Amino acid sequence: MRSLTVALLACSAVALSACVTTVKEQHLQDGYRLLSGSEITTLVSGQTVEGRYGDGHGTYIDFRAADGRLSTLEPSGKTYIGTWEVEDDLLCLTYPTVPVPIPKCLEIAEKDGHYVEFRISGPAAGKLGAEYVSIIPGNIKNLPLE
């Protein structure tokens, strides 16, 4: 009887782990759809994007210039200068002045005009990178690009 109970508990644990989904999967099940590369370019090129980090670390403001330059104002007040580009169906951001200047690529999903970013690699893969609060044409905060 004890071995049957242990076996049932083990099977229940396996079944529960199979039910666990990432935040990305939950959003897609709720009707969000991933944007194509051309949709991402149209959405962010020449725009100021205000976003709320998915990990609760505050709100950032990006200006993503049409020529690929990028300026990000972090919640700490620090500004990072970098570049952005779309590779395949990913938005890739590179900041040469951060300690490890590797591109950070994100998927963007949309539902009813609401946009979210998902991390695609590392321990945060599938997690919410940010929710877009607003997208406004131009460099409305006059963020530096050099």
Image (cartoon, helix red, strand yellow):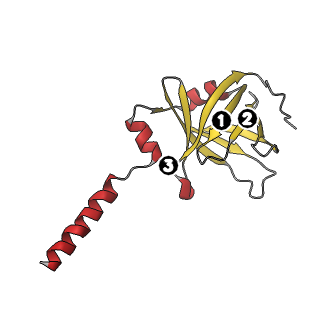
Residue in the picture at 23% in, 65% down:
11
**Image location of residue 47, percent across then percent down:** 71, 26
Is 72 left or right of 127, judged from the image as shown? right
Q: Give the Cα separation between the discs numbered 1 and 3.
A: 18 Å
The circle drawn on residue 51 is 1
Residue that badge 2 annotates? 61
Farthest bottom residue in view: 2
Disc 2, SS: strand
Q: Are marks 2 and 1 in contact (CB under 8 Å)?
A: yes
**Image location of residue 63, percent across then percent down:** 75, 31
Q: Amino acid at mark 3?
A: Gly
Disc 1, SS: strand
Query: Tag count in the figure?
Result: 3
**Image location of residue 5, percent across then percent down:** 18, 73
Q: Amino acid at mark 2?
A: Ile
**Image location of residue 93, percent across then percent down:** 69, 43
Depicted 128 relative to depicted 69: above or below: below
Which quadrant is the N terminus positioned in?
A: bottom left
Residue that badge 3 annotates? 126
The mark nearer the N terminus, 1 or 3, is 1
Q: Give the Cα separation between the discs numbered 2 and 1.
A: 6 Å
Depicted 107 relative to depicted 114: above or below: below
Q: Amino acid at mark 1?
A: Gly
Which quadrant is the C terminus positioned in?
A: top right
Task: Tell me the crowding category of disc 1: few under 14, some 14 to 19, or many 20 or more residues within 10 angstroms, Cα based.
Answer: many
From this viewpoint, is residue 89 visible? no
